[in-house]
């Protein structure tokens, strides 16, 4: 019985030693930055100008339609949606009007406004003219179904 207790104590000691050593190694890999120092870039694939982006980000993700899975980041005060080239978000579907709707960002809130489209704009199955959007709302423009995500 005593040998078993000694064995368990030794195993606990080894476990604690290995955890502390791993933690120290991780801390040594993290560079220390002085006040005012620039943060080194860790990725060349995504560089964001944080002065241009709102505090919270909003996205539209196509859930049903030709470009299923495609997402659109909403960063402007007003983002127009339609099938015509002059829109910020172009959805090339014949059931989507040329200038179908627009998303308006007002402080930390987002609204969708129908622009007199032929098939209307639905939010969570209800036809709307102008509606406050919430995270997870389902938007339908013609036959195209989108999900509004706000981070």
Image: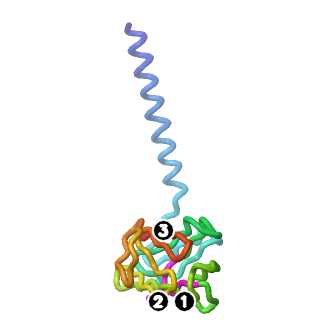
**Label 1, label 3: how far apart the Cα atoms are:** 19 Å
**Residue at mark 1:** 99
Among numbered discs 2 and 3, the one appearing first in the sequence: 2
67 displayed left or right of 112: right
The answer to which quarter of the image holds residue 69 is bottom right
Q: Magenta segment range? A: 73-82
Residue 104, how many percent across, how many down? 41, 86
Among numbered discs 1 and 2, the one appearing first in the sequence: 1
Contact? badges 1 and 2 (CB < 8 Å): yes
**Residue at mark 2:** 115
**Label 2, label 3: how far apart the Cα atoms are:** 19 Å
Q: In the structure shown, which secondary structural element does the residue marked by tag 2 occupy?
A: loop
Residue drawn at x 43%, y 75% is 122
Q: Which disc is residue 147 wearing? A: 3
In the image, 41 versus 76, the foreground residue is 76
In the image, 92 versus 87, the foreground residue is 92
Name the quadrant of the C terminus. Answer: bottom left
């Amino acid at each position: 019985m005593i040998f078993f207790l000694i064995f368990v104590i030794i195993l606990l000691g080894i476990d604690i030693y290995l955890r502390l050593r791993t933690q120290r190694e991780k801390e040594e890999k993290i560079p220390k930055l002085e006040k005012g120092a620039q943060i080194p870039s860790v990725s060349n694939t995504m560089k964001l100008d944080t002065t241009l982006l709102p505090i919270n980000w909003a996205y539209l993700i196509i859930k049903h339609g030709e470009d299923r899975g495609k997402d659109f980041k909403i960063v402007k005060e007003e983002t127009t949606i339609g099938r015509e080239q002059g829109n910020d978000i172009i959805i090339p579907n014949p059931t989507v009007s040329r200038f179908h709707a627009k998303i308006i960002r007002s402080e930390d809130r987002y609204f969708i406004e129908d622009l007199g489209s032929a098939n209307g704009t639905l939010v969570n199955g209800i036809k709307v003219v102008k509606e406050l959007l919430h995270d997870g709302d389902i938007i339908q423009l013609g036959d195209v179904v989108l999900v509004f995500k706000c981070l």
